Amino acid sequence: MGTWDDLRAELDCWAQSETYATMWWRDDDAVSLTPQLEEILSCERSYRVPLALAVIPGKVENDLVDRLVETIDTRVLQHGWRHENHAPADRKKQELDDVRPAESVLADMKTGFDILTARFASRFLPVMVPPWNRIAPQVMAGLPDIGLRAVSTFGPRPAPYAVPGLLQVNTHIDVIDWRGTRGFVGDGPCLDAMIAHLNGRRTGAVDEDETTGLLTHHLVHDAPTTAFLHDLFSFEHSALRWQAIAGVFPWQ
């Protein structure tokens, strides 16, 4: 399992090549103001690590809109429409699915896009975060037509653009053990994932220009998850740079 010393050693390699190991932070499933959300907003403020908050437009509540006005670096991304599964029972959950006609799925996404545009104004970036990180190809192809400029799922991207006009910037470190305890996955697995993607970028095994992404889900964070985030955000190295969210999506 990876250790903080292993992370420092990887970052030392970046420093030796006089390049920055860039990272970004995406948190999913935001709907309303909760103690868990206040905790991550506190992290953003205390450590100055910019946050991309994936908001579910069909469920968003007024208190979230009001609270985000007070933040400095938080940006809003679109998390589907209502985070509802449309896949049959024998398939993995999916909202941006291939079960319904693509036109119907895209109509829902356009409604969500319009809501977030109206409620969050310039704080909303036209980036789609598919619930469960899954999206049907025909739906992906239609996202630029409704105004979306980028998509973010999980794992190293195969190419900078998912389809023409749609930048892809994914996340690579998931702090939750979804297949086991559904609590914190542990320092070791998180550091392993972080080191693996940074090493892959540095050695050319993955796209060197895709910034390394941290994925969190504030609603299910436990005390060990929160402790890890504090440790990570307070970790200092000359080669490590947390990016402003607008800089992660360089059409800005």
Image (spheres, rainbow, N blue to C red):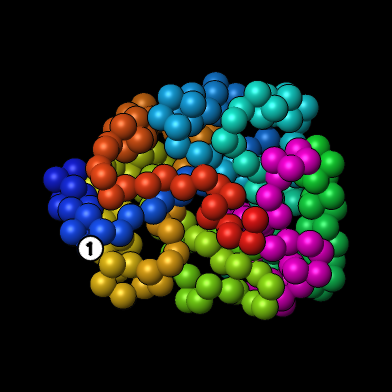
Q: Which residue position holds label 1?
A: 17
Q: Nearer the viewer, residue 44 or 179?
A: 44
Asked whether 127 falls inside the magenta stretch, the response is yes
Q: At label 1, which amino acid type do we have?
A: Ser
Q: Visible in this render: residue 98?
A: no
Asked whether 98 falls inside the magenta stretch, the response is no
- How many numbered marks appear? 1
In the image, is 58 to the left or to the right of 250? right
Picture coordinates of residue 40, whole percent (x, y): 49, 30
Residue at 49% x, 26% y: name it.
Answer: 45
In the image, is 106 to the left or to the right of 194? right
**Label 1: element kind:** loop
Picture coordinates of residue 173, whole percent (x, y): 38, 52
- Please tell me in which quadrant of the rendered image residue 80 appears: bottom right
Q: Is residue 171 depicted above or below 30 in this figure?
A: below
Q: Residue furthest front?
A: 18
In the image, is 5 to the left or to the right of 52? left
Residue at 68% x, 35% y: name it.
Answer: 31
Picture coordinates of residue 143, whole percent (x, y): 74, 67
Residue at 65% x, 48% y: name it.
Answer: 77
Q: Is residue 147 depicted above or below 239 in this figure?
A: below
Picture coordinates of residue 136, whole percent (x, y): 66, 72
Q: Visible in this render: residue 117?
A: yes
Residue at 53% x, 28% y: name it.
Answer: 41
Q: Is residue 56 depicted above or below 168 in this figure?
A: above
Alpha-carbon neighbours of circle 1 within 10 Å: few (<14), some, or many (≥20)? few
Magenta segment boundaries in residue numbering: 120-149
Q: Nearer the viewer, residue 167 or 230?
A: 167
Q: Quadrant of the C terminus?
A: bottom right
